[in-house]
Image (cartoon, rainbow, N blue to C red):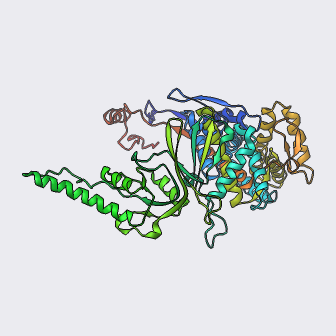
Amino acid sequence: MENVIVLNSSAMRQKNNGNIQAAKAVADVIRTTLGPSAALKMILDPMGGIVMTNDGNAILREIDVSHPAAKLMLEISRSQDDSAGDGTTAVIILAGEALAVSRRLLEVDHLHPTTVISGYYKALEEAVAHTKTLTKTIDTTDDDEIRTVIKSTVGTKFVKSWSDLVCNLALKAVRTVAITKEGQATPEIDIKRYAKVEKIPGGAVEDCQVLNGVMINKDVVHAGMDRFKRDARVVLLDSSFEYKKAESTLEIDVSKGEDYTKFLKLEREWVQKQCSAILAVNPSVVITEKGLDDEAQEIFARHGVSCIRRLRKTDLHRVARVTGATVVHRMEDIKASDVGTASTFEIKKIGDEYFTFITQDEDVPVQPKACSILLRGASKDVLNEIERNLADAMNVARNIIIDPRLLPGGGAYEMALATHLAKCSQKITGLEQKAYAALASSFEVIPRTLAQNCGAEVIRVVTELRSMHNKPGMETWGVDGYTGKLQDMAVANIWDPMSVRLQCVKTAVENATHLLRIDDVISGTTPSAGRGQRAAQEQAAGMDTQGMDVRGMNTL
């Protein structure tokens, strides 16, 4: 039988080792950004801007890759950031190493990918079980213990020179937004929605603070309105003070001037009616998500009410958490119980812009459950990096409060897993033993990278650490990221949240197994190849429209 061309001439195929090489290339890009002696990456974005950071997720978010396996590696960094908020660099390095050690199993030992995957999953199951024996639990009511853990995380970031300040900011913000509902064992902490970062260039980093309330980049809508009020009564609305226009084109023929005057009068009366309903509850500040008519502005200004319009819905909800007000949908339904209170309502001009501050005093009975974090710095690049580092610190604080179990840092946890799994691999029978042992050796990449990034003798340090972990009671020893020497992480007080480290291991191994399942990467036809051209190619190759060989019935 003659050969049959099944694939389009524009299609491309790539075997499994291409996926491994692509994943390892992504891991090598950010390998030098791990640890306290990490290097910074300078990234040029498509708009010509510059991003300088050592945050793994921020780096991978900016780079552009074309290989599908590399794109999957970028996705696991984002998923790690969404689920745990930290560990985005370690998860990429672990996944890349897990794939790198599998290459020898596939090409030299000629193991089937299914066998490698089965061995990896068995090793992962044992790693998860062994992790729980290495944990240490802290008291979540002790702020000093939580600061110690946050400080060990911030120590690898750009803001390590201001680690005490960042730790206090992160912990105060998380404590502010935490809400413990009745019947729940763990508090609900929504940092992304209720702890908003406001960056204002200028000033010193030491001027950064967590407000006991919120700040909004808005000014009052009328020049006659007050910009400062004490003990303000706040009304929040998500409806408009503007007269409703027709949704479609509407034409009205007016034959008399008096009729046009009546139309204008009806609009004014409607606006006055809405304002009267609001003024009945005696507010001093009105904040609305929608627009505010000029007539309404005049009415509120005459009654000494300050107004802010076109606020984002997320900002409106944060103001509601600070003041205790209820967002009102219809002005006619407003009640006195819907009105909130704020100790201070103040509008300040910082730089060229006006900012509204709605804050509570420290001695109010009910403290706000939302906050704004004001960041100051010399430039926008510095502020962006501080924001990224602060987000990691807040996520660590949140993870500790929700799950107070910790693991030793400095690569001690990964080396403990590598040593334990290497011993367990001797009990595994069959071909899966090699995959089991290979995954065990891949965990050593974290202490090896830490030693490499600080200029230590990598082989000597890793060999000594491996020998030390084979002795009982030495599971907390790791690599000092500054000097490259071995150190007891328990004595140095370097700990990581268990939820972050365990999520790194799970995500890395699962992603590696997914890529190992792929044995072929086939690109589709190019967009320029139309349906007529493709049909002609198939007909010339002797195939029907289902892509099969009509003469030999050999399918793809």
Observer-nearest of 496 and 372: 372
Residue that protrudes farthest toward the right in the picture: 471
List x then y, in percent, for residue 335: 42, 70
Looking at the rendered structure, the number of numbered marks drawn on it comes to 0
Task: Report the residue at 68% width, 33% height from top.
Answer: 28
Q: In this image, 473 relative to 228: left or right? A: right
List x then y, in percent, for residue 107: 69, 37
Observer-nearest of 17 and 372: 372
List x then y, in percent, for residue 487: 88, 43
Observer-nearest of 478 and 510: 478
Task: Report the residue at 75% width, 37% height from top.
Answer: 161
List x then y, in percent, for residue 214: 55, 52
Work out which quarter of the rendered image holds the N terminus and state it: top left
Q: Quadrant of residue 59?
A: top right
**Is residue 470 something that shows in the picture?**
yes
Task: Report the residue at 17% width, 55% height from top.
Answer: 263
Placement of 556 over or under 396, stated as above or below: above
Observer-nearest of 495 and 192: 192
Placement of 388 over or under 133, stated as above or below: above
Placement of 3 over or under 355, stated as above or below: above
**Is residue 508 something that shows in the picture?**
no
Task: Report the residue at 65% width, 33% height from top.
Answer: 25
Q: Quadrant of residue 180?
A: bottom right
Residue that protrudes farthest toward the bottom in the picture: 183
Residue that protrudes farthest toward the top in the picture: 48
Q: In this image, 293 relative to 408: left or right? A: left
